[in-house]
Structures are given as structure tokens and as C-alpha cells.
Amino acid sequence: MPNEQVSISVADAFLDRFADVVKRIEQAGLKVDQQLDTIGVITGSIDSDDIGKLDQVEGIAAVERSRGFQLPPPDSPIQ
């Protein structure tokens, strides 16, 4: 299955154990791109079939899938 980009919010109670949460989500299959520990967010990519594994990781408040969009070219008749 294809990889999906995700943003993960770490629960406030686990911010002091941010590195441990990162380690656990990597074990669940996430390829970490960024660790924004000051705001409690981790971004990365994971196989679509493995996204459900992230819900089982202790310390995660939310998992949000990235959404893409495509704007029409500037010379397009629809703006």
C-alpha cells in the first residue's frame, strides 16, 4: 500500500517523555520527518495499512492524515 503523510499530536501528559513517544511510533511503522517537541507534534509517513497501529501507541492525542489539493494554473479559465 502507498505511504500517507501524517501529523501526530502528543498528549500533554507525555510531553516530558516526547522522545519515548517518538521511539514507540517508529516501532509502529512511522518514518519520522520532523520532531517538533516544543509544540508536541511529530510528522512523518506510514504505510496506509499501518495507520491503525498509531492509535495503539500510548501518549498520542491525535493522528491527522495530510490532505492534498491542486490549484488550477494561473491562466486557467476557472479561478
Image: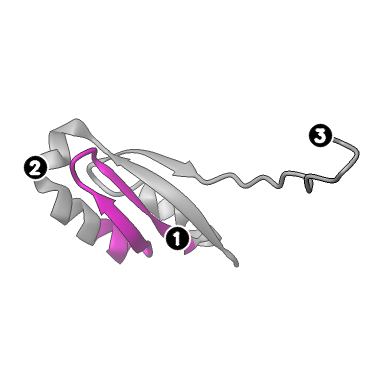
Identify the mark nearer the N-term, 1 or 3: 1
Q: How is the image coloured?
A: one colour
Q: Earlier in the sequence, mark 2 or mark 1?
A: 2
Mark 1: which amino acid? Ser
Q: Rate crowding at label 2 as few (under 14), some (14 to 19) or many (20 or more) other CA atoms within 10 Å.
A: few
Label 1 SS: strand
In the rendered image, which quarter contains the N terminus? Answer: bottom right
Per the model, the C-alpha gap separating discs 1 and 3 is 32 Å
In the image as oriented, which residue stretches furthest toward the left? 16
User: As rendered, which of 32 and 46 lies closer to the eye?
Assistant: 32
Between the residue at mark 2 and the residue at mark 1, the CA separation in whole angstroms equals: 24 Å
**Which residue, given by chain and number where applicable, does mark 2 sit on?**
16
Q: Is 45 drawn above or below residue 52 in the view shown?
A: below
Question: Mark number for residue 36?
Answer: none
Q: Quadrant of the C terminus?
A: top right
- The x and y percentages for residue 17 are 11, 47
Which residue shows up at 36% across the image and 45% down it? 8
Foreground pick, 74 / 8 = 74
Please tell me whether mark 3 sits on a helix, a strand or a loop: loop
User: Measuring 87% from the left and 36% from the top, which residue is drawn there?
Assistant: 78
Of tags 1 and 3, the one toward the viewer is 3
Rendered residue at 21%/52% (across/down): 21
Residue 19 is situated, as x and y percent measured from the top left of the image, at 15, 55
Q: In the shown orientation, is residue 38 left or right of residue 26?
A: left
Q: Give the x, y percent position of residue 7.
A: 40, 46
Give the residue number, with chain letter if any, for mark 3: 79
Would you name the residue on which mark 1 appears? Answer: 45
Q: Which residue lies furthest to the front in this view?
A: 75
Camera-near label (2 vs 3) is 3
Residue numbers of the magenta segment: 24-46
Q: Which amino acid does label 3 sit on?
A: Gln
